[in-house]
Image: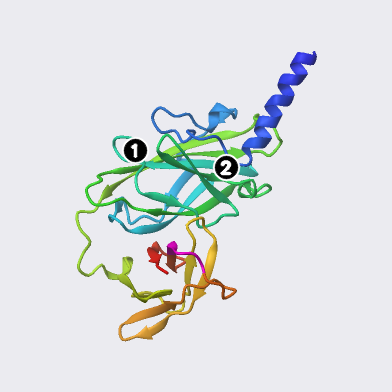
Amino acid sequence: MLRATAILATCVALLLAYSDGPPDSKTGRPGEGTCADCHSGTASGDSSALAGLPGALYYPESTYILTLGLRYAGQTRWGFELTAVDESGRAAGELFVTDSVNTQLSASGGRQYLKQTSAGTQRGRPDAASWQFGWHAPTAGSGPITFYWSGNACDGNGSSEGDFAVPSNLTVTEAAAIEEDPGTDRYQWYYESPGQNRVVIRYAGDPQQPVKVYSSDGRLVRILTPVPEGEVLRADWDGTDRSGEPVPEASYFVLLDQERSGSVKIDLVR
């Protein structure tokens, strides 16, 4: 009886620990497990979807803000793990956090793994959940990229019983070239650093949407107000955060429009 009690306590402890994020290699990628390794059942893959990419394409070295959605009627707690790989199973592009409260990144075997945090389990939320994150596409010539993920739809009772793994994947093809006039479905943008501690971003977009600067770990650094400059918009950043303090020299992600895949990666030089 003592041995059985000890085993049960260990299992419960593991389940509680995984609410902080599953172990790596649970995405359903070939050779990896899924959330079903620790939870009781498997649901249909059509209970989840990845949104934010332009159809089944990606543009090399472009940055996208993606949303992973998970649905399962009657469930009230949620989790996931996701990775992006090329045809050889190597890490493809760069995943990055845009919401550090609900998501986090880890790395193993040369691949990145994006997953939920404890707060990201959204305990008590009925029937569906979603998470937002960023992906910077790889260089030209990388070929098809596949996102593998395993969602976890839980009933929140603290055990593995009544939980359902929801594995799925999405393969996107490299676009042959970026059109000279991308049109309304894609941003035209560029940035320059005319002097140390200063970045100027010019782009075509929605003037009503603020420009948000994020650190590589997903922390919101600064919110900028764009101003018209001819036929484009311009946003200037002096390299300080929201409190006016200088930020370190590093790479930052700039979200041009919250509702579209319009994020760019910039480098601040001091």
Please name the amino acid that badge 2 sits on.
Answer: Gly
**Front residue of 174 and 244:** 244
SS category of the residue bearing label 1: loop
The quarter of the image holding the N terminus is: top right
Q: Is residue 208 visible?
A: yes
Report the side of 203 relative to 259 (left or right): left
Q: Which mark is residue 141?
A: none
Q: Is residue 148 above or below residue 175?
A: above
Q: Which residue is mark 1?
A: 90
Mark 1: few, some, or many residues within 10 Å (few <14, many ≥20)? some
- Give how far across and how far down residue 234 sits, in percent: 38, 80
Frontmost of labels 2 and 1 is 1
229, 165: nearer the viewer: 229
User: Range of the magenta residues?
Assistant: 247-253
User: Looking at the image, is 65 positioned above or below residue 238?
Assistant: above
Q: Position of residue 124 (x, y in %)?
A: 68, 48
Direction right: furthest residue: 2
Disc 2 crowd, CA 10 A, few/some/many (<14, 14-19, 20+): many
Residue at point 48% right, 75% down? 210
* For marks 2 and 1 on the same chain, the one whose residue lies earlier in the sequence: 2
Marks 2 and 1 sit apart, C-alpha to C-alpha, by: 24 Å
Q: Where is residue 233, by image quadrant?
A: bottom left
Q: Answer with the quarter of the image where residue 13 lies.
A: top right
194 to the left or right of 26: left
